[in-house]
Amino acid sequence: MLSLARSSLRPSLSRAFIASGASLHTLPPLPYAYNALEPYISEEIMKLHHQKHHQTYVNGLNAAEETYAKSDSTREKIALQSALKFNGGGHINHSLFWKNLAPANTDGGKLADGPLKKAIERDFGSVEDFKKKFNATTAAIQGSGWGWLGFNESSKKLEIVTTANQDPLISHTPILGVDIWEHAFYLQYKNVKPDYLNAIWNVINFKEAESRLLEASK
Ligand SMILES: [Fe+2]
């Protein structure tokens, strides 16, 4: 994977990185095949989303970090903040998103009895009410963004929150994140965001979400 990310950077940039000892971010492999989430998320979407969109955030983050590391101008470093946030957030969010999903014939869509289910029932009344509230909240995002099930460290409760653009979730520990950018659904669901949101529950990896909750509640 390293070679994939490296090859897409300019050779001079890649050499400068290696010389400076900075670590290159790389595109993480998908933990399942591109067609494994069908019929809920098409192979075409998964390929483009992973190979093109996520790769672009990785490249942008490497370029911004490299420029930042070489710069001795405070002004230039401040100007780089938005590129770092956008591409860094894009890389973090998508890395999490792939692990949030699983094929429906393996773990996808199955919320077994356990700490996550209990916490959802405690904080939202029922699993169905949670899904309804999550879908309504995320469908209402204006423009591009992310819908999250987050763990509030202060109240020790699960909450539904949204972030705009590629902003990562900072206020809460992310337990589950859903990409609400059009590139995540438009080729298959066109402008009908609620259909995408209804379908995605069939491939949500609740096991992964539960392990994040357990880690966050330690
Ligand atoms: Fe995305």
Image (cartoon, grey):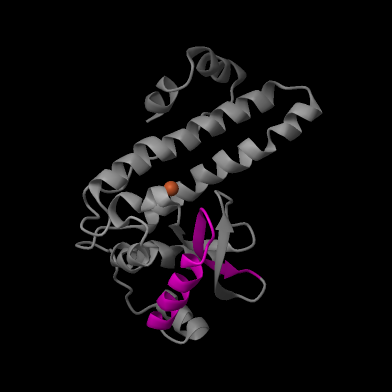
Examine the rendering and report whether any part of residue 218 can be seen: no
- Residue in view at x 38 percent, y 51 percent: 184
- Residue in view at x 21 percent, y 55 percent: 38
Q: On screen, 32 above or below 72?
A: below
Q: Is residue 57 left or right of residue 198?
A: right
Q: On screen, 150 above or below 8?
A: below
- Residue in view at x 50 percent, y 57 percent: 146
Q: What quarter of the picture does the N terminus occupy?
A: top left
Task: Please say whether residue 152 is one of the residues in the magenta stretch.
Answer: yes
- Residue in view at x 51 percent, y 44 percent: 90
Examine the rendering and report whether any part of residue 79 can be seen: yes
- Residue lying farthest to the front in this orientation: 191
Q: On screen, 213 above or below 124?
A: above
Percent x, y for residue 46? 30, 46
Q: Is residue 112 left or right of residue 161?
A: left
Task: Please say whether residue 165 is one of the residues in the magenta stretch.
Answer: no
Closer to the camera in the image, 141 or 16:
141
The span shown in magenta is 127-153
- Residue lying farthest to the right in this orientation: 74
Percent x, y for residue 65? 62, 30
